[in-house]
Image: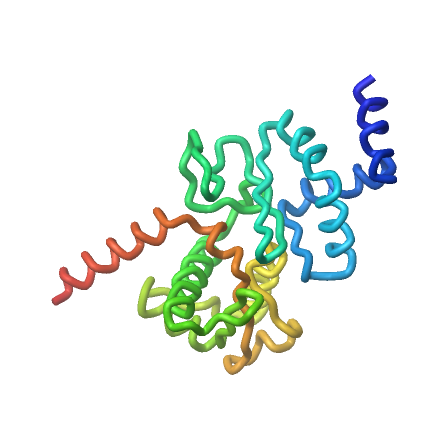
Amino acid sequence: MLTDVLKQQLEKENLSLDEFRELTIRLLNYGVLCRGESQTEQQLYDRYLRIADLVQDYLHVLDITVFHDRRFEYLRLYPPGGQTPGMEAADVSAFAGSLRNRLSQSEVAMVLVLRLQYDKALREGQVDDKGYVTESIEALSIAMKNILARSLPEKLTERKQLFIHLRRLRLIEFRSEEDLVSGEAWLKIHPMIVSFVNDEAVQALSLATTQENKTTE
């Protein structure tokens, strides 16, 4: 019965149930959809715009929230109890990845650095018209050492896996995996880093860093 109602609603937009399934399954599998990522994601994003209410109602049954950034044209799913930007939440979580992706310590450290470097570039007006910030891997490595007293993984395979995973989360972009072995390589930080790492996590890190600096003085 519910399927029949859904079909009727989809027919108004000349869409099939299979097309609805393709969109929702993609969202549930990846937790994020970015229009500028590929032709496939562009098509799915545009499809979402046509049936946004239907998708949101469907996911609401699972207590999953859709965060839609219209300016930068991306969607991100937030799991039950997750903190959605601009909305009240029962549970405060510093990271809202692909339905609570498990991040390694190196990934958590890099994500924090990405957010801080993005904020710095934003203050300095070094953001392009699509909201991206261009940063070198060397600069990120230096920032990680200065802020968190950590280093990037020494093994090149682990370093590549780190950045590949963050690209899968749509937090960064880079030309090719081979570029990652070079310290002079550059990457782009996606504006969705701001919604991925909340302000509370940034403030806590800044406070901890300030206290540590006072201790060492």
Which residue in the rendered view is the most extreme toward the top?
A: 1
Give the percent coordinates (x, y) of residue 66. Answer: 60, 39
Inspect this view and state whether residue 16 appears: yes
Spot occupied by residue 106 in the image (x, y as percentages of width and height): 46, 58
Residue 80 drawn above or below residue 212? above
Residue 162 falls left or right of residue 6: left
Residue sitting at 62 percent across and 28 percent down? 60
Q: Residue furthest left?
A: 217
Tell me if residue 158 can be seen: no
Q: Considering depth in this image, is 107 or 188 the residue closer to the camera? A: 188
Q: Which quadrant of the figure contains the N terminus?
A: top right
Please give the count of numbered marks on the rendered protein.
Answer: 0
The residue shown at (42%, 45%) is 94
Residue 93, located in which quarter of the rendered image?
A: top left
Residue at 57% x, 35% y is 65
Residue 63, image x, y percentages: 58, 28
Residue at 25% across, 59% down: 209
The quadrant of the rendering that contains the C terminus is bottom left
* Foreground residue among 125 and 109: 125
Q: Where does the image place residue 169, in percent across and percent down from the top left?
A: 59, 54
